[in-house]
Image: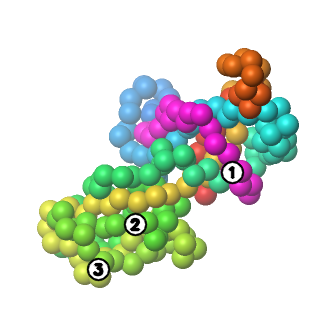
Amino acid sequence: MYTVIASPTHVLPHSSRTVTLKDDVTDAYEFRRRLTRPLGKWELVFPGTKEVLDSLSGMLQTAQGDTKIKFDGAATTEVTDPIIIAVGDGQTTDFMLPHRNVYVSSTVIYLNGIATNAWQPLGGDGVTMFQIRMTSAPGQFSQIKAKYKRYANAVWNTEEDLGMDRVMRRMNERLSIHHIRLVLTEVPN
């Protein structure tokens, strides 16, 4: 896995794939998830001098679309307002998070709108997780919400060309005369 630290001028999350099963013969949807969690796709544009952008371009050409890249999402992967992750039934204590690679230290869990620490992380490596376990089963119809930061394992989408362009924004400012445009697609862990 590669890690690149760069500053894109813009990150455009332009899709989230949440596929349901479809019958190939009748084109009828079965309304069952084909993926456990949605997968994102981001378009990124990085400005800089040719010398600076060569290292990013070289890493992407080495990865060639089949090597995972750890992408922090440039704030597009954060859940900043609590989202419902489950509704209690009085028996279940383990709840799947809607995203992978959630940082344990950034996670805040809410039970019926009130922050709680009556949970522990499940799955992952101790730094990240993909599931939580409540200390006791939340009551019937209790709302379990969460907010957190995460990263995405992504690959360079080779169907979208890696473009390096020369952009003349200001003739006297050498740092903004090139940019790289690429698309990253999230992959399951």
- For the residues carrying marks 3 and 2, which lies nearer the camera in this image? 2
The vertical placement of 165 against 70, above or below, is above
Disc 2 marks which residue? 107
Label ID, residue 5 = 1
Disc 3 marks which residue? 118
Lower position in the chain sequence, tag 2 or tag 1: 1
Answer few, some or many: residues within 10 Å of disc 2's Cα (few below 14, many 20 plus, some between 14 and 19): some
In this rendering, position of residue 93 left or right of residue 99? left
Query: Foreground residue, 78 or 47?
Result: 47
Query: Foreground residue, 166 or 80?
Result: 166
Task: Identify residue type, mark 3.
Answer: Ala
User: Seen from this angle, which residue lies furthest front?
Assistant: 172
Give the quarter of the image for residue 167: top right
The vertical placement of 45 against 116, above or below, is above
Q: Residue at x 43, y 66 (%)?
A: 106
Q: Position of residue 96 (x, y in %)?
A: 39, 63
User: Seen from this angle, which residue lies furthest left?
Assistant: 140
Q: Secondary structure at mark 3?
A: loop
Answer few, some or many: residues within 10 Å of disc 1's Cα (few below 14, many 20 plus, some between 14 and 19): few
Q: In 3D space, how far apart are the residues under numbered discs 2 and 1 (Cα atoms)?
A: 23 Å
- For the residues carrying marks 2 and 1, which lies nearer the camera in this image? 1
Pointer 2 with pointer 1, Cβ within 8 A? no
Specify start and end residues of the magenta stretch as a single range: 1-21
- On the question of residue 94 being in view, the answer is yes
Which quadrant is home to the C terminus?
bottom right
Task: Identify residue type, mark 2.
Answer: Thr
Give the quarter of the image for residue 144: bottom left
Query: Foreground residue, 136 or 26?
Result: 136
Q: In 3D space, how far apart are the residues under numbered discs 3 and 2 (Cα atoms)?
A: 12 Å
Q: Residue at x 69, y 19 (%)?
A: 170
